[in-house]
C-alpha cells in the first residue's frame, strides 16, 4: 500500500519569461504590492525589472523594501514589517534567495498582526498572513514552495524556523535565468542546500511515498547538473535542472521537514559565518555514513541517482564543491552537538539521534 498525505497549495509557474507572461496574475491579489528583497540580487538577476514591468502593466501600486540581509534577523524583518504597515499592501512579492523569501513570509504575517517578531514562533496568527508571491533567484532553499521561514534569533544565538500553512506562497514563479547572475560560490553552496533537502527528506522518519517521488526526481536532475557544476561551466541546462531540483526539494521538505543536518548546520552559520548550503554540505557525507546503519538501501539509491560509487566519492565531491576547510574545537563540537540533539529536527532523523551521534557526526566531519 502506498503511504502519503499531500498538501501543497502553491501554484508553480515555470518557464522563461513566466513573470512578464503572467502579469495579469498579480492582479488577483490586489492593487498594492510590497516587494521584499535584498540589496543587489533582485536587480542583478533581472527579476526586479520583470516584476516592475508586470506591476506597471497592471496598474498595481508598489513599494520596495530592499534591505533584507543574508540569514535575516528578527530585527531585520521587523524593519520590513514597519515598511509594510505604513504602506498597507494587499500582498507581498519576495524576490531573491531564501533570505528574501523567508523575510517576505515573516513580513506577510507581521504586516497584519500586531505581534512582536519573537511571537512569530508561537505559530498563532490572529489575522491570516498577506498572500505571498515568491520568485527565487537562487536554486537552493525551495522556500518558494514551503510553509517555513528561517530567521536568526540573536538572543538564542541560533537560527530557528517557524511554519504556518498561510506561509505557502500563492504563486512561485520559476525562471532559471534569474539564477544565472549567481557567482560560482553561491551557485555551488545553494545547489548543495537543495541536495541536502533532498537527502534529508529521503532519510527522514516522516518520508512518504509521495515525498520520495519528489526526492528521486530531484536527485536525478541534480545528478544531471553535476558535471557542469564541478566544471564551473554553468549552462542553461544546469541552471534549469538545479532550479527545478531545488523546488522539488522544497516540495519534499514541505512534507517531511529537514533533519539533524540542518540543526547541526545552524551554529556553523551563526558562530562561524558559514553560508547555509555549505554548512549542510560539510556534514552530509557523515550523515550518509550514519544512515547506512538504519537505511542502507536508501543511501545506496541516493548515491546511484547521483552517479557516485560510494560515500567516499560523495565526500570528495563535497570537498571539491565547497571546500571542506572548517575545523572545530572539541568544546565547540560538544556544545553544538548537544544543542542539535535537543531539536525537533533530531527527532525527524532515523535511528536515535542523541548527543553522542551528533558529536560523532561533527567530530568526523569537522574535528
Ligand atoms: P541568500 O542568503 O538568500 O543569498 C545569498 C547571497 O546571494 C546574497 O548576497 C544574495 O544577494 C545573493 N544572491 C541571491 N540571488 C542572486 C543572484 N541571482 N545573483 C547574484 N547574487 C544573488 O541565500 P540562500 O542560500 O538562497 O538562502 C539562505 C537562507 O534560506 C538561510 O537563511 C536559510 O536558513 C534559509 N532556508 C530556508 C528554507 C525554507 O524552507 N524556508 C530552506 C532552507 C534554507 P542579496 O543580499 O542582494 O539578495
Ligand atoms: Fe536549507
Image (spheres, helix red, strand yellow):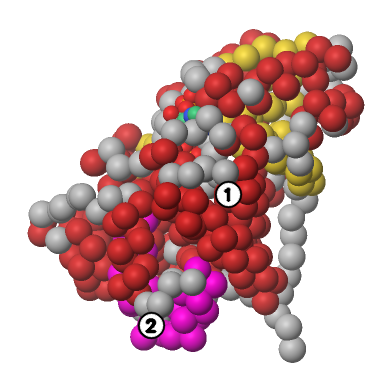
Q: Quadrant of the N terminus?
A: bottom right
Residue 273 percent location from the top left of the image: 28, 38
Side of 279 where 54 appears, left or right: right
Q: Which residues are magenta?
A: 281-306
Would you name the residue on which mark 2 appears?
A: 292
Where's the C terminus, which quadrant?
bottom left
What x and y, as percent, mark residue 137?
Answer: 58, 34
Indicate whether 109 appears above or below 214. Answer: above
User: Which one is nearer the viewer's eye here, 181 or 209?
Assistant: 181
Q: Is residue 294 magenta?
A: yes
Question: Is residue 201 depicted above or below 72 in this figure?
Answer: below
Is 3 contained in the magenta span? Answer: no
Magenta span: predominant SS is helix
Looking at the rendered structure, the secondary structure element under dot 1 is: helix
Is 356 in front, or is 326? 326
Question: In the drawing, does residue 67 fall left or right of residue 14?
Answer: left
CB of mark 1 near ligand 1 (< 8 Å): no
Residue 343, quarter of picture: bottom left
**216 sits to left or right of 289:** right
The residue at the far left in this view is 330
At horizontal 67% and vertical 12% (from top left) the residue drawn is 63
Q: Residue furthest bottom?
A: 1
Q: Is residue 190 visible?
A: no
Is label 2 in a helix, a strand or a loop? loop
Q: Does residue 80 sit above or below 153 in this rendering?
A: above
Whether residue 230 is visible, yes or no, is yes
Front position in the image: 154 or 139: 139
In the rendered image, residue 256, in percent from the top left (x then y), is placed at 58, 65
How crowded is the residue under tag 1: few (<14 C-alpha within 10 Å), some, or many (20+)?
many
Q: Is ligand 2 closer than 8 angstroms to the Cβ of mark 2?
A: no
Mark sitting on residue 238: 1
Amino acid at each position: 500500500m502506498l503511504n502519503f498525505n499531500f498538501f501543497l497549495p502553491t501554484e508553480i509557474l515555470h518557464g522563461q519569461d513566466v513573470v512578464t507572461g503572467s502579469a495579469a496574475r498579480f492582479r488577483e491579489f490586489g492593487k498594492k504590492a510590497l516587494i521584499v528583497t535584498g540589496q543587489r540580487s533582485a536587480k542583478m538577476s533581472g527579476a526586479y525589472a520583470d516584476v516592475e514591468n508586470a506591476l506597471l502593466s497592471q496598474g498595481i501600486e508598489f513599494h520596495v523594501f530592499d534591505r533584507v540581509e543574508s540569514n535575516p534577523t528578527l530585527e531585520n524583518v521587523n524593519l520590513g514589517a514597519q515598511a509594510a504597515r505604513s504602506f498597507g499592501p494587499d500582498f507581498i512579492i519576495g524576490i531573491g534567495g531564501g533570505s528574501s523569501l523567508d523575510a517576505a513570509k515573516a513580513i506577510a504575517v507581521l504586516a497584519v498582526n500586531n505581534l512582536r517578531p519573537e511571537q512569530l514562533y508561537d505559530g498563532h496568527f490572529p489575522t491570516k498572513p498577506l498572500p505571498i508571491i515568491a520568485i527565487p533567484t537562487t536554486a537552493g532553499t525551495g522556500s518558494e514552495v514551503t510553509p517555513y521561514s528561517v530567521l536568526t534569533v540573536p538572543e538564542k544565538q541560533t537560527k530557528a524556523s517557524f511554519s504556518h500553512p498561510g506561509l505557502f506562497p500563492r504563486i512561485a514563479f520559476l525562471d532559471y535565468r534569474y539564477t544565472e547572475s549567481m557567482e560560482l560560490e553561491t551557485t555551488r553552496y545553494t545547489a548543495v542546500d537543495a541536495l541536502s533537502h533532498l537527502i534529508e527528506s529521503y532519510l527522514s522518519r516522516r518520508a512518504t511515498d509521495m515525498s520520495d517521488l519528489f526526492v528521486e526526481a530531484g536527485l536525478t536532475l541534480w545528478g544531471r547538473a553535476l558535471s557542469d557544476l564541478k566544471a564551473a561551466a554553468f549552462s542553461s541546462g544546469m541552471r534549469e535542472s538545479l532550479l527545478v531540483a531545488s523546488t522539488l526539494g522544497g516540495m519534499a521538505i514541505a512534507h517531511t521537514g529537514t533533519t539533524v543536518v540542518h540543526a547541526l548546520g545552524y551554529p556553523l552559520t551563526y558562530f562561524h559565518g558559514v553560508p547555509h548550503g555549505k554548512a549542510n554540505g560539510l556534514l552530509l557525507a557523515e550523515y550518509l555514513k550514519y544512515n547506512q546503519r538504519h537505511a542502507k538501501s536508501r543511501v545506496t539509491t541516493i548515491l546511484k541517482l547521483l552517479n557516485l560509487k560510494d560515500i567516499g566519492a560523495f565526500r570528495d565531491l563535497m570537498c571539491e564543491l565547497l571546500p571542506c576547510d572548517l575545523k572545530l574545537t572539541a568544546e565547540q563540537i560538544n556544545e553544538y552537538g548537544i544543542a542539535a540533539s535537543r531539536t525537533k529536527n533530531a527527532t525527524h532523523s532515523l535511528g536515535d539521534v542523541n548527543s553522542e551521534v551528533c558529536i560523532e557526526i561533527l567530530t568526523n566531519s569537522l574535528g
